[in-house]
Amino acid sequence: MGKLIGFIDDKLKRFDPVWRAENGKGGQRSRYHDVTGVAKYREWRGVKDTMFDYASWLNNVLAMVKMVGSAPVSIMKGFWEYRWMGSYLGTFMFIDRLFEGYRGEELRVAHAQMHAIVRSLTGRIGYILSHDRRLGASQAKSEKLVPMDEVLPELFMTGFPGLYPVPLQTLPEFIICDVDQHIEPYYIDVAESFGLPADVCSRCAAETGVALDDAFPLVGKALITTNMPCNASEATSMFQRRRVGLPDYQATLAMIHNDDELALPFSRQIMKETIAFVEEQYGVKFNWDAFFKAARRINEQNNFELEKWDYMKTGYTAEVGVSETLYKLYEWQSVNGADPYFNKVDRKVMKRLRKCYEKKYQPFGGKTRHRAFLWGPSAVYYTDFPTWVQNCWGIAIVLNMDSTMGFNMIDTEDPDKAIDDLARLTQKATMRHMAVGGWDNVNAVWEWAHNFNCDMVLMNDNIACKGMLGVHAIMEEQARDLGFHFIFIEHDLEDSRTVSRQNMRDCVNQYMSIVLNEEPLDPTLLNFDDSDAY
């Protein structure tokens, strides 16, 4: 069988885009239609990898079918009611793009992690829509759900096992903006049509537009908002809670939080008040045993993450690029210890990673030229940016900022200590610890890059973020002094009309060709039109 597979692989290698790029006969973009970005055929990766990739695709389709089967009437009403639901049909194209060029162990790790996300997300969509009062669910059925701001870690909600937390912005904004570059500009326009300034952060504008368009599922008895991650988000929370119209509590988290003595007492009190708010509004009591069970799961996940980092520092790992950071982002932000399936996936992945390290396995056939630390949010996902820089220029994204979120352990015996640990976890939430938690947090990028043996830093340059605009020149000077190759990646977060995908890619193209005088691994990836793609 091995000889037969080898014979077929040799005969069909001319269809492999990696082989075609190496031999000047095309490359990854040769199989795509321009503008729409629709693939003419699936990527040929050799018999074993192609069959595995296709089986994984079918497994994700099955998860989608199960979602529809779980609540067919609500799902169909959801497609009719919510514009963002249609964008989820692009998930399969999104996954195919994410893993272009993946072979062997990195392909298997990536699909294991991505299927966990698809499985969880489809289940969540089906459940939430079946409890949505906009779609006909009863008041009593809907009131088992607790809408809350997406950047507030859900771990504390595991202490209420009879309730179901709904990160309000996740379905119509936070997740789908990674899949479809065209959905959020519509909601941005809705927000601006109501008079919101056009120069505000596009994430905040999009979330406000979703609220004003009545595109949030209508669930629950009370709403938990936050001030995270920035001042524009505080305004967004005000618009959201006025439009949703439920009793609300704002979990105001500390801005400068690196000093426990200053920040922890405040964050601890906020966490206690948040729990008390849920108890009062929903008539339930916090269950410490249920919470500790979930805390043990997130502790295991965090231990695995720290072990992964040790392998990633060496380069002998199949945990790479977008698969690592997207999985960590979802596991921490949207699961947060609540789903034991992710622990099961982590255990299987860790077995593979340990074997890869023992064998000194090099992903992407050892073609990596540079190791980069990426400090970038949503725009790096819908552009498939980590995959693109590896396939085009041989730049391995070792770690992204979304992987540096809270990884402190949670006490699983003492409620007082657990509250403190939970407060620390909220302080290290999405973006709170990366861009608006003080200069020390942004400046930590150099330490991260050094610890992971990177020679390059790719830095978020959100043109609408007032905070990041102020550090541009300082970061350039520090990179020069510290000896890092440094590239600012311009983007407008979720508005691809301002800075297109190709504009973002050109930031790297120009540096690599003009400053480093390097040639691309795949010339077809240098310049292409995917302006109408998902």
Image (cartoon, grey):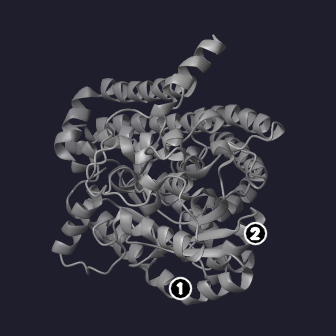
SS of the residue under disc 1 = helix
SS of the residue under disc 2 = helix
Task: Tell me the kind of residue under disc 2.
Answer: His
Label 2, residues with CA under 10 Å away: few <14, some 14-19, many ≥20? some
Please tell me the numbered disc located at residue 120. Answer: none
Depth order, front residue of 12/285: 12
Q: Earlier in the sequence, mark 2 or mark 1?
A: 2
User: Is residue 240 something one can see in this rendering?
Assistant: no
Residue drawn at 58 percent across, 18 percent down: 7
In the displayed structure, would residue 110 be above or below residue 522? above
* Circle 2 residue: 450
- The x, y position of residue 530, in whole percent, is 31, 55
Task: Tell me the kind of residue under disc 1.
Answer: His
Q: Quadrant of the N terminus?
A: top right
Q: CA distance from mark 2 to mark 1?
A: 20 Å
Left or right side of 341 for 128: left
Label 1, residues with CA under 10 Å away: few <14, some 14-19, many ≥20? some
User: Is residue 478 something one can see in this rendering?
Assistant: yes
Question: Do tag 2 and tag 1 residues touch (Cβ < 8 Å)?
Answer: no
Residue drawn at 46 percent across, 26 percent down: 54
Depth order, front residue of 132/20: 20
Please tell me the numbered disc located at residue 472. Answer: 1
Residue drawn at 48 percent across, 32 percent down: 14
Q: Quadrant of residue 89?
A: top left
Depth order, front residue of 174/284: 174
